[in-house]
Image (cartoon, rainbow, N blue to C red):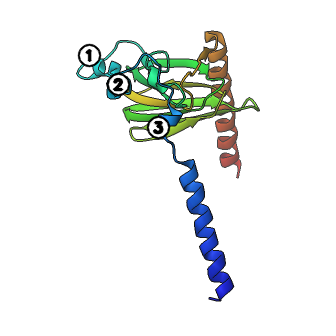
Amino acid sequence: MGIISCIHSILFVLMVAQVIHGSEIDLKLDSVIPPNITTDYANFFTHSAFRVLIGADPPTAFKFMKVSEAEFPALNGQGVSYAVLQFPSGSLNPSHRHPHSAELLFLLIGSLKVGFVDANDVLHTKTLQAGDLFIFPVGVVHYQYNYGRDLAFAISAFGSANVRTITTPVALHLAILISSSIKYSVLTEIRQIKCIYT
């Protein structure tokens, strides 16, 4: 390798190191700590609301619990919030959207059928198993449904400390699902007919 290539390599490494160093978050500068917090910062940065879930009886209907800036002020300025979603067998988190945030769902227990409608009004569905992650892009109408016999338990992360949820009317949700089922049935029948006659 020539001297010029070595110099270019060294300059490249130094530029990358500068970008990495420049993007590191200084918690003291990036956090918004209220002026009335004068003692133990560790308590300010701790939230214990999810402890009630440990050892609790499973719910009888879909249940969610969120932690956003409103419940946990330390999230102010951090661009993140969480929700815990519990789905008894046959339960549905009806169609809704988050206009300013993506949702990253991590399925810990059970199975879920999830779906979202893209900008072209195309319904995308996927069956998830425990351990799967699924991303719902920013602003899309989406849902989750536990079709299994057992409880499903998921955690969702949002790219906003102040995530908003806009629920769509039940009639619209049913129309989306019925439309999808009809399209799927028609496509399945067309495929079967093609197989028979080819």
- State left or right for residue 64 relative to residue 174: left
Q: Which mark is residue 145?
A: none
Q: Give, as a three-letter code, the residue at label 3.
A: Leu
Q: CA distance from mark 2 to mark 3?
A: 38 Å
State whether residue 85 is above or below residue 22.
Answer: above
Residue linked to disc 3:
27
Residue linked to disc 1:
57
Does residue 146 appear in this view? no
**In contact (CB < 8 Å): disc 1 and disc 3:** no
Query: Camera-side residue: 130 or 6?
Result: 6
Residue 133 place in picture, x, y as percent? 48, 40
Q: Give, as a three-letter code, the residue at label 2.
A: Leu
Q: Nearer the viewer, mark 2 or mark 3?
A: 3
Instruction: Name the N-terminal-most of marks 2 and 3.
Output: 3
Q: CA distance from mark 1 to mark 2?
A: 11 Å
Residue 162 place in picture, x, y as percent? 56, 21
Q: Give, as a three-letter code, the residue at label 1.
A: Asp
Instruction: Name the N-terminal-most of marks 1 and 2.
Output: 1
Assign the N terminus to one quadrant of the image. bottom right
- Furthest residue toward bottom: 2
Check disc 1: other Cα within 10 Å, few if <14, some if 14-19, many if 20+: few
Residue 15 place in picture, x, y as percent? 62, 63
**In contact (CB < 8 Å): disc 1 and disc 2:** no
Residue 184 place in picture, x, y as percent? 64, 33
Q: Secondary structure at mark 3?
A: helix
Which image quadrant for residue 187?
top right
Q: Secondary structure at mark 1?
A: loop
Residue linked to disc 2:
151
Does residue 107 appear in this view? yes
Instruction: Name the N-terminal-most of marks 1 and 3.
Output: 3
Q: Residue at x 40, y 41 (%)?
A: 131
Check disc 3: other Cα within 10 Å, few if <14, some if 14-19, many if 20+: few
